[in-house]
């Protein structure tokens, strides 16, 4: 199932929809017609747990194209927001999680050339999140080194506290795409949150694909271009710490809750690692994709 948060042109609040072919089916309206109370916010849907997804799947199958009046809109006629427009907590970011990216970071950013023995964890605040096609803001007053990183993100569906690797993926609600924008010259004493957590630095979307459709998150191609020129291309099989390892590791000390987001790291090909180094500037366009989930496109603007 592919879930989105969308806004119709006459609405001001985002609503949860499910993509069926080229239509966005409103989840709450579909439920209401069948006498089922389904929410209109993504976080509320995640909170209801696997039973809500089972109910929604059954309602879609039963409808067979007979959608509720006003509850099915052409995808082309709506605006997609980030699937979780305002996360409850900071996004968990994972640094140096692809082997070749460790090497390029060591050469360009003074990080250690040794492979991490444990996941390197940082965070991005909720205010960094933007939805598909929204502008990434380049604040020239504080950065001249704005960089790109395409990533698979896992979204937690049920509480995970001190779980094992074997248990970990059972706690995943679904997966989406994140661009981890990074102002490389804004790192402070080795700390990354100001570099990576600025406003608009977490483009997210275009949808959440539920975990039942991605039984193995370590088989997914991902790529990124700047102005149509390919900069990154890899596969999630090259992660140093796999998704189940990341969930298990974080949960040993930090309880993961429904709606929590883990951005699982980026492969090689970032601007800082190139010779000469490359950065994005106002007027540039970043596009990326994780196969099986979808594509993001974002202009860079001055601000």
Image (spheres, helix red, strand yellow):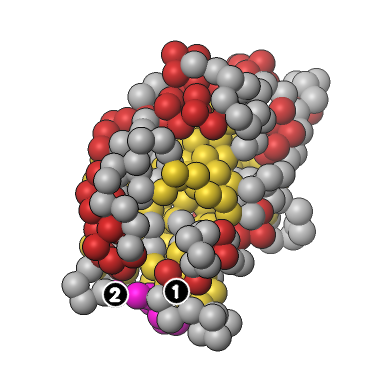
**6 relative to 69 in the view: left or right:** left
- Residue assigned mark 1: 185
Q: Position of residue 142 (x, y in %)?
A: 54, 81
Q: Position of residue 5 (x, y in %)?
A: 63, 46
Q: Nearer the viewer, residue 30 or 38?
A: 38
**8 relative to 118 in the view: left or right:** right
Near mark 1 (Cα within 10 A), the count class, few <14, some 14-19 or many ≥20, is some
Q: Main secondary structure of the magenta part?
A: loop
Looking at the image, residue 56 lies above or below residue 106: above
Q: Position of residue 240 (x, y in %)?
A: 31, 36
Using the rendered view, name the quadrant where residue 193 is placed.
Answer: bottom right
Residue sticking out furthest to the bottom: 141
Is the residue under label 2 in contact with that under label 1 (CB below 8 Å)?
A: no
Residue sticking out furthest to the left: 275
Kindly identify the residue that appears in the image at 28 percent across and 66 percent down.
108
Kindly identify the residue that appears in the image at 43 percent across and 25 percent down.
244
Looking at the image, residue 170 lies above or below residue 204: above
Tell me the distance, in whole angstroms, between the alpha carbons under discs 1 and 2.
13 Å
Q: Which mark is residue 132?
A: none
Q: Which mark is residue 278?
A: 2
Near mark 2 (Cα within 10 A), the count class, few <14, some 14-19 or many ≥20, is some
Q: Is residue 116 magenta?
A: no
Q: Which residues are magenta?
A: 278-284
Using the rendered view, name the quadrant where residue 162 is placed.
Answer: top right
Task: Say if residue 292 shows up in the picture.
Answer: yes
Kindly identify the residue that appears in the image at 80 percent across and 20 percent down.
35
Looking at the image, residue 11 lies above or below residue 35: below
**202 relative to 53 in the view: left or right:** left
The quadrant of the picture occupied by the C terminus is bottom right
Which numbered disc, 1 or 2, marks the residue closer to the eye? 1
């Amino acid at each position: 199932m592919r879930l989105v948060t969308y806004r119709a042109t006459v609405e001001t609040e985002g609503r949860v929809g499910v993509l069926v072919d080229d239509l966005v089916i409103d989840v709450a309206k579909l439920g209401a017609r069948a006498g089922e109370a389904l929410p209109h916010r993504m976080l509320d849907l995640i909170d209801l747990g696997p039973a809500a997804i089972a109910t929604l799947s059954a309602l879609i199958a039963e409808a067979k194209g007979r959608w509720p009046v006003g509850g099915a809109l052409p995808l082309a006629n709506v605006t997609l927001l980030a699937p979780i427009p305002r996360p409850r907590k900071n996004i968990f970011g994972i640094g140096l999680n692809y082997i070749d990216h460790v090497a390029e970071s060591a050469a360009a950013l003074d990080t250690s050339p040794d492979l991490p023995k444990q996941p390197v964890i940082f965070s991005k605040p909720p205010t960094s999140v933007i939805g598909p096609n929204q502008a990434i803001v380049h604040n020239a007053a504080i950065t001249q080194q704005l960089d790109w990183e395409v990533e698979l993100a896992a979204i937690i569906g049920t509480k995970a506290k001190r779980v094992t690797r074997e248990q970990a993926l059972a706690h995943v609600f679904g997966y989406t795409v994140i661009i981890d924008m990074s102002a490389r010259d804004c790192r402070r004493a080795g700390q990354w949150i100001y570099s990576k957590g600025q406003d608009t630095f977490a483009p997210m979307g275009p949808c959440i694909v539920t975990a039942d459709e991605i039984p193995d998150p370590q088989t997914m191609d991902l790529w990124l271009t700047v102005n149509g020129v390919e900069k990154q291309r890899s596969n999630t099989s090259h992660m140093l710490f796999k998704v189940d390892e990341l969930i298990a590791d974080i949960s040993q000390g930090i309880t993961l809750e429904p709606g929590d987001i883990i951005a699982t790291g980026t492969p090689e090909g970032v601007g800082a690692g190139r010779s000469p180094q490359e950065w994005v500037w106002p007027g540039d366009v970043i596009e990326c994709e994780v196969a099986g989930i979808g594509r993001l496109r974002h202009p860079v603007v001055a601000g």
